[in-house]
Amino acid sequence: MARYLGPKCKLSRREGCDLLLKSGVRDHKSKCKSEKLPGQHGDKKPRLNSYGIQLREKQKIRRLYGILEKQFRNYYKKAARQKGSTGENLMALLERRLDNVVYRMGFASTRAEARQLVAHKAILVNDKVVNVPSFLVNPGDTVSVRQKAKNQGRIQAALALSEQRAPCDWITVDTGSFKGTFSTAPTLMDLSSDYNVNLVVELYSK
C-alpha cells in the first residue's frame, strides 16, 4: 500500500493551508510554524498561470485525502464515466473511501490514522472486518470499531477531538457504541468551500 512518508507540514505549507494531516491535539500553526513555501526560495511566492492554479488545486485535494496520483486519476476516470457532474462524482468517491468515513465518524484523528486502523483490522463494515482503506462504503452501510480495539487510547482521543469538529449531515454516529451509519454520499454543497474540484476536472479533461 503505497503512501507518502515525508514531512506532513511540508505538504500543508506547499498548498498554503492546513490539510488536516496532523492530529488536532495542537493547532496547525504551533506544529507547522513556518508560513513559507518549502524549498530554498520558499519566501518568493510564484505567479501561477491557469495550468498552475489547476495543478495546485488537484494537489491540495489529493493530499487532503492522502491519495497518490495514479489512484486519484483513476477516481477521476470513474467519476467521468458516471452520470451527473464529474466533480461531484469525484468528491463522492473520495468521501466514500472507508478510511475517510472512519475519520469523518471521529474514530481517528487523521485520515492517515484511520487508514492504519482499517489496515490493522480494527474496523467493521456491516459487522464484517474490512482491511482495505480504499473500500467504498455504500449509503446505508454501518461502520464500527471492533470490540477489542475500543479501548485503544488513540480512538478515545480521536472521539474527544471530533466533538470540536462540525458534524457531517450525511453521517450519523453513536459514540457510545462506537458505531456510525453512512446515510448518503455528500454533495459539493455539503463539503468545504476551501477547494474547487471543478479546476481538477478542467485539468484532467485537457
Image (spheres, helix red, strand yellow):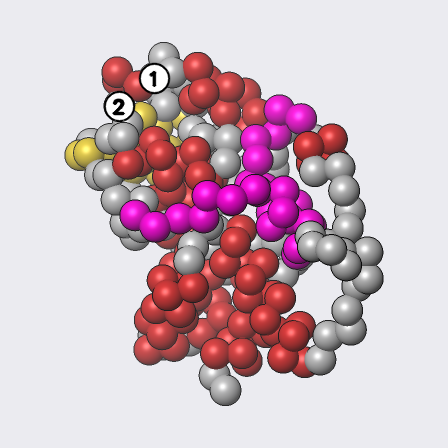
Q: Residue furthest right?
A: 44
Give the residues drawn in magenta, as a range.
Answer: 1-26
Residue drawn at x 50%, y 58% as measured from the top left:
62
Q: Which mark is residue 146?
A: 2
Which amino acid is tagged 1? Lys
Q: Position of residue 104 (x, y in %)?
A: 47, 39
Q: Secondary structure at mark 1?
A: loop
Q: Residue at the location (63% across, 42% down)?
A: 9
Please indicate whether residue 30 sits to the left or right of residue 203 in the image: right
- Asked where in the image residue 172 lies, by quadrant, the reply is top left
The residue beneath circle 1 is: 150
Is residue 64 shown to the viewer in this render?
A: yes
Rate crowding at label 2 as few (under 14), some (14 to 19) or many (20 or more) other CA atoms within 10 Å: some
Q: Quick check: 91 above or below 115?
A: below
Task: Give yes or no for contact between labels 1 and 2 (Cβ–Cβ under 8 Å).
Answer: yes
Relative image position of residue 59 (x, y in whole percent):
55, 62
Residue at image position (82%, 62%) is 44
Front position in the image: 41 or 14:
41
Q: Nearer the viewer, residue 145 or 54?
A: 54
Say whether residue 140 is left or right of residue 45.
Answer: left
Residue at the location (34% across, 17% down)?
Answer: 150
